[in-house]
Image (cartoon, grey):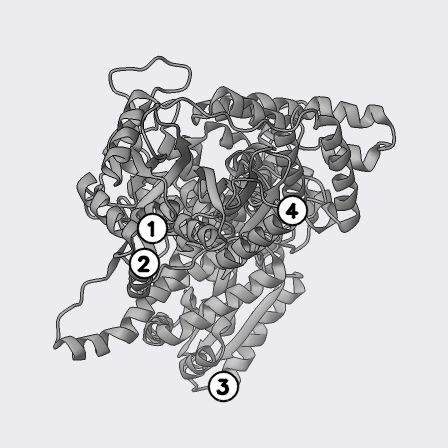
Amino acid sequence: MTGTDVQKEAEDSGPSGYAAARLRLLTEETRPGPPRRAALAQLTDDWLTGLFAAGAEGLRGASLVAVGGYGRGELSPRSDLDLLLLHDGGDTKAVAALADRLWYPVWDLGLDLDHSVRTPAEARKTAGEDLKVQLGLLDARHIAGDLGLTTSLRTAILADWRNQAPKRLPELQELCAERAERQGELQFLLEPDLKEARGGLRDATALRAVAASWLADAPREGLADARRRLLDVRDALHLATGRATDRLALQEQDQVAAGLGLLDADTLLRQVYEAARVISYASDVTWREVGRVLRSRAVRPRLRAMLGGGKPSAERSPLAEGVVEQDGEVVLARAARPERDPVLPLRAAAAAAQAGLPLSLHAVRRLAATVRPLPTPWPAEAREQLVTLLGSGRPTIEVWEALEAEGLITRLLPDWERVRCRPQRNAVHLWTVDRHLIETAVCASEFTRRVSRPDLLLVAALLHDIGKGWPGDHSVAGEIIARDVATRIGFDRHDVTVIATLVRHHLTLIDTATRRDLEDPATVRSVAEAVGSQGTLELLHALTEADALATGPAAWSSWRGSLVADLVKRVSAVLAGDAPDDPEEAAPTAEQERLALEAAATGSPVLALRAQTEPPAGQEPSGDPEPLGVELLIAVPDQPGVLPAVAGVLAMHRLTVRTAELRSVYLPDGVDGSVLLLDWRVAAEYGSLPQAARLRADLVRALDGSLDIAGRLAERDAAYPRRRGVVAPAARVSVHPAASRLATVIEVRSQDAPGLLFRIGRALEDASVQVRSAHVSTLGANAVDAFYVTGPEGAPLPGDEAASVARKLEETLRG
């Protein structure tokens, strides 16, 4: 039977004919999805039109209007009918009789009905008082009766909505936020509500309302398809349960999947999650744009009055090379060339996350459309920017989602596609696999002060469950994938092995601590053999806790934490074979010796700047090596204050210190005095590098006390305060008394920031200790610095004095 035959049967047979035609339509297998919903709406329209014609004979000034989902023509098998009987206020008795002739047949068939009888003025008044009514009327559609009455109401409602948008849209946003708080996020729930949860059908309808206001519009790419998929799932759910439900319960998922022709319930959930993710991201972008437009409308009259008319240009503040902040978003600089700068997506993402700002939709789409793929292995800057992004805490999530929405994540990490939107059928898990990996990195960012290699911790956190997209033990599969990914993004062979080990054994500590006898020496030995080193054990301990915290509240407790800590202590004892050797004094190179002799002869600083390069991992140097920044060699006659002076001058010139070595150089026989040699790798925060002569002149002034570095840095910070986007973990300073026989080793782990090394150096000088050598490294947004210090007599510090220095240094960095 064709669709025309079905409609004719409904018209000919009254309510019973409609019921039969409706049943026949819903059991057809040839027209699922939008065609069936449209056919069901048309069938219902025809039936109601017949009822209206029979009951409104002789009545003028009345019309029947579909609103809400029915108004949009989106009738699912068990959807209720949202109907408005509109009249001009003339013959109210005839209108009441007509209403009975319409509503009772609907109820007799057991259909849910949401109905009202109003004049246009009453409808507008109710809409003005009740936002939900107004939203329903935005989708008003004429069914029968006086078309002019319906059209005039639609025009008035849309005009009211647009005029009242500055007031009503914030109210709508608050309504969406309250619903999300109650219902959760559709893209992560095992039993989601397809309509009410965040990213569901209600949010899709809200986006239509925003668009109707003409104030802002949602990103349309993929949005209609996401909405259609959720409606298709709801149709199948109604048919499977025979009920008007929007909750996709576990026990219904296999049947719903079969009804949609999908492989299994996991495939169903993944499609639901993908659709919800599109709607959620579109909502974020749209509400951000609404806020921007409303703020600009509020500010514009005042600015025009101040500026005497004209449109003021938006302020743009630099964040990184090619990246600026504008109107509360991160956008590309005007001079940025994504087609020539493959690192730009990661640099922009890291800058946005560090500043706690969203990436603009336009910027992400431009990057997705024009940026070239990164070479393999990645440049060092790309690796560092990825680590910075992962270590930025909670803002990482929003930035990551923006990149993922435009397909940039899977282009950077192709293995991500297998875990994207993958459900986890475990009540302990709160998130899909991909979101769990990002949550783990966020949690791990809180532990970067506990480990000596935070970059390895953050990358292992991102990859620890990457094997869940493959069959078999996900830890075994993940080790193989992690080894490949870590090599591709440019880690050296040793670091690749550490990351692979962390992924392979990310469950080892928690499983062993909670399931094995820790008093059995064989248990502890097996873990020690699997881990292999103290450094890897330290990382694995932090990863274990981050993984558990990111799983959900049931996965971690103080009891579990104490068991894992006990196991780590026992394994550490097994691994603590030999104490670390003292750092060996490396012979200076010819250039270093030349600079040292010149510094000794002149009694003043000597420096040299040169580009530093390295070949890709596993390859011989090529004719076009990769620039890693600039190597800064400085030789200075040994004197107090060298470390803070050099660090302060570099901070004044906006140079970022990536690595730094400071040590004494033994001069040849016959040359008096001693020289400190500083071998640092630096890069411009943005812009070009300063000239060597200018750096040397400022360094001379800093050492003789005529340059007030602290004052200059304070003035700059006051004039251009840095945005505090990320609340970083507090600095941690520790003493390692067994690390050296000749000096006391003080280790500082802190958030990298301009002037950090200057503050550390000045604090050590104020503590009257001598820095025998320094080993500084910047890993993403984290600084891990070790200082070998002695007392005035050249001996290691006593234990209590070393603890006091560490405590004061920690207070300085936290102040």
The kind of residue tagged 4 is Gly
Viewer-nearest residue: 204 or 541: 541
Q: Are marks 1 and 3 in contact (CB under 8 Å)?
A: no
Q: Visible in this render: residue 723?
A: yes
Residues under numbered marks 4 and 2 in contact, where contact means CB atoms less than 8 Å apart = no
Q: Return the residue at label 2.
A: 713
Residues under labels 4 and 1: Cα distance? 30 Å
- Residue 241 in picture, x, y percent from top left: 69, 48
Disc 1 secondary structure class: helix
Q: Earlier in the sequence, mark 1 or mark 2?
A: 1
Q: Image point 49% across, 62% down: which residue?
A: 815
Residue type, numbered disc 3? Thr
- In the image: residue 159, left or right of residue 463: left
Position in image of residue 246 (x %, y %): 62, 54
- Examine the rendered structure and indicate whether residue 338 appears above or below residue 234: above
Front position in the image: 476 or 800:
800
| Left or right: 612 in relation to 396 | left
**At label 1, which amino acid type do we have?**
Gly
The mark that comes first in sequence, 4 or 2, is 2
Q: CA distance from mark 4 to mark 2?
A: 34 Å
Residue at which label 3 appears: 92
Secondary structure beneath disc 4?
A: helix
The three-letter amino acid code for the residue at tag 2 is Leu
- Residue topped by disc 1: 648
